[in-house]
Image (cartoon, rainbow, N blue to C red):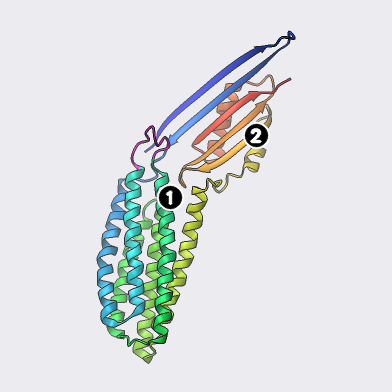
Amino acid sequence: MGIRHQHDHGHNHEHSHARGTSSVEAHGHGHNHFHSQGVNAKNERRMAFAAVLIGSFMVVEFIGGILSGSLALLADAGHMLTDFAALSLAWTAFRMARRPADWKHTFGFDRFSVVVAFVNGLSLFAIAALIVWEAIKRAGQPVEVMGAPMLVVATLGLIVNIIVFFIIISGDKENLNIRAAALHVMGDLLGSVAAIGAAIIILLTGWMPADLIMSVLVAVIILRSAWYVVREAGHILMEGAPKGLDRRTISADMHEQFSQIVHVDHIHAWSISQERPMVTLEAIISGEANIEDTARAIKTRLHDRFGVEHATVEVKRERR
């Protein structure tokens, strides 16, 4: 649920100069504030339930990995640990995002969810490195793996991951925090599939290296997910322009839509979170155009064409 405040201010300043000439400069400022929570109580409950399921089965899978001697299972349990942390952080981010803005945090707390997604992405890099390191160590010291218990635990893990994955993606699919958590679980789901494959190979052929190969495959899958999340979250944290908000496109669109616009400058586009794009710009208009009407029209165009709910627009009259 969002709270929307709209303020339009028009200022006319007349300056007299010693030489007897005068100039009139008019400024129109349009501010359109939209505080989008991006999450709701249902999202929080989904994430909490998913975290409990993952956390509970993580213990089962860790014990199964110890008893069977499977690195693939231990790797998957380690990934589940990061999943549990990621889902818990995601839940915390959802709670934080619901807090209202205050004088210290005038945009609210939506950005916290992006920070959490970034941290989750970095944690994926760390767990992938640990899996590869353990696989390298085990390659020189082969470990006997019990295929049957490994297959049972991996199959149960697959079922749990499928359930958790569908719980998560039933939320706001465009939310970066949701997508980061879903990628965590997707990597874990594929890890369970890899562990099942390794268990079947070991049961049928007795070839133990299959466990190591599958564990490294899980690490590669994790790295791919990690890069995606870190790249997207990092772009937002670096105040990068949201997708579809190229300032060159915005400038061209303003000139095409409004004949009274002479020049558009100081266009800045960024986002608080993936759901909250922001734009500021300055428009120079011809002498006969109405400042306030132009400011409102520009904001409406930014909303309708580019999906921008928060725009700060300054309009100045062309100097003659």
Place residue 84 in its image quadrant: bottom left
- In the rendered view, would you say 237 is above or below 220? above
Q: State which tag comes first along the sequence, 2 or 1.
A: 1
Dot 1 amino acid type = Val
Q: Which residue is mark 1?
A: 114
Label 2 Cα neighbours within 10 Å, binned few <14 / some 14-19 / many ≥20: few
Dot 2 amino acid type = Asp
Residue 135 lies within the magenta run: no
The answer to which of 215 and 172 lies nearer the viewer is: 215
| Residue 176, visible in the rendered structure | yes
Q: Which residue is mark 2?
A: 265
* Magenta region, residue range: 98-108
* Residue under the point 40% across and 47% down: 112
Element type at mark 1: helix
The answer to which of 17 and 235 lies nearer the viewer is: 17
**Farthest-out residue, top:** 20
| Residue 167, visible in the rendered structure | no
The answer to which of 260 and 26 lies nearer the viewer is: 26
Place residue 192 in its image quadrant: bottom left
The answer to which of 173 and 237 lies nearer the viewer is: 237
Residue 26 position, x and y percent, is: 62, 19
* Residue under the point 63% across and 29% down: 283
Tell me the quarter of the image containing the C terminus.
top right
Residue 53 position, x and y percent, is: 27, 63
Residue 265 position, x and y percent, is: 65, 34
- In the rendered view, would you say 180 is above or below 217? above
Element type at mark 2: strand
Secondary structure of the magenta portion, mostly?
Answer: loop
Place residue 247 in its image quadrant: top right
Label 1 Cα neighbours within 10 Å, binned few <14 / some 14-19 / many ≥20: many
